[in-house]
Amino acid sequence: MSITNPWPRFTKEGFKKERIPDDLYFDMMLEYNKARFTDIQQDPYFEPHYDQVVSGGAIAMLDTDEPFYLRANISDQAFDRWAKKLQPLMEKWCGEKLNFIQGYGIRSYHKDSMLCVHRDEISTHIISLIVHVDEHPEVKWPLEFIDHDGKLHKVTFDKGDMLMYESLCVHARETPFTGEYYRNMYFHWCPVDWDPTPYQNNWVRYRSIQEALNED
């Protein structure tokens, strides 16, 4: 497997983990404490590139063909408010002027969940942020991330951590989650002059991290 056109590089490694600013974290936790996880997300289909049955585009579960996750729907107004505070941090990190595309969550993953190996949507999801909200019990569920030099990292999170990342870098959670729930929010931006055309024939889904590491 070969890359048709080299992927863009905006930062040195492609990711950076930091703590969420205190005022922003406080606001997010106010919303979280009001949240109710009553929205069951389940649209299973077989994705041949993953060789897995998935829901939500990339979520599989161990030993079942009916993967699911739960979602508490935070208002668009809250995500817009948070994105305005986060965007200057994201622009400073990546060196690009950005357009805010989308914020969503809170997504709640459950026991035996896995995130298949992928790159994000090449048209819009270029510079992204994960906010780790909560987990129970305190179980580390590593995010596998392949940086620009082809090195594999396993990133773990504490509550209140945020991960800035270039979402066209390969990422996954191949290890099944062993806890009761694991909850994240997501934000996506796109450089104002972004052109996805050169990358449309590149691979964005893989059966394993090793398959992605073997890509040249």
Image: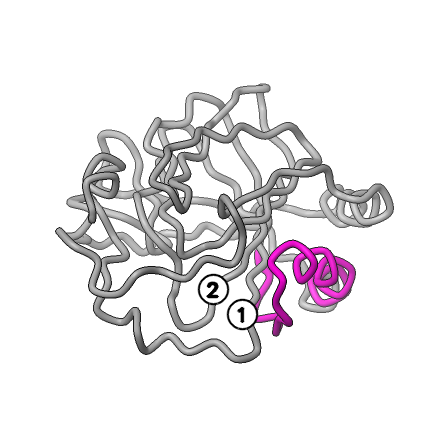
**Rendered image: mark on residue 54:** none
SS of the residue under disc 2: loop
Query: Does the magenta stretch mainly form a helix, a strand or a loop?
Result: helix
Q: Amino acid at mark 2?
A: His
Mark 1 Cα within 10 Å, few/some/many (few <14, many 20+)?
Answer: many
Rendering quarter of residue 111: top left
Give whichever of 9, 80 is nearer the camera: 9
Which stretch is magenta? Answer: 79-104
Residue 52 vs 160, above or below: the answer is below
Q: Residue at x 63, y 44 (%)?
A: 131
Q: Earlier in the sequence, mark 2 or mark 1?
A: 2
Q: Residue at x 36, y 47 (%)?
A: 170
Left or right of 56, for residue 107: right
Q: Residue at x 78, y 60 (%)?
A: 85
Give whichever of 209, 176 is nearer the camera: 209
- In the rendered image, residue 53, in percent from the top left (x then y), is placed at 22, 46
- In the rendered image, residue 163, in percent from the top left (x then y), is placed at 59, 43
Residue 112 vs 73, above or below: the answer is above
- In the rendered image, residue 86, in percent from the top left (x then y), is placed at 72, 57
Q: Which residue is mark 1?
A: 190
Please check the rendered image and state whether residue 103 is part of the magenta-colored stretch, yes or no. Answer: yes
- In the rendered image, residue 34, in percent from the top left (x then y), is placed at 75, 47
SS of the residue under disc 1: strand
Q: Amino acid at mark 1?
A: Cys
Residue 177 vs 200, above or below: the answer is above
Rendering quarter of residue 22: top right
- Disc 2 + disc 1, Cβ < 8 Å: yes
**Rendered image: mark on residue 125:** 2
Give whichever of 149, 112 is nearer the camera: 149
Please check the rendered image and state whether residue 211 is part of the magenta-colored stretch, yes or no. Answer: no
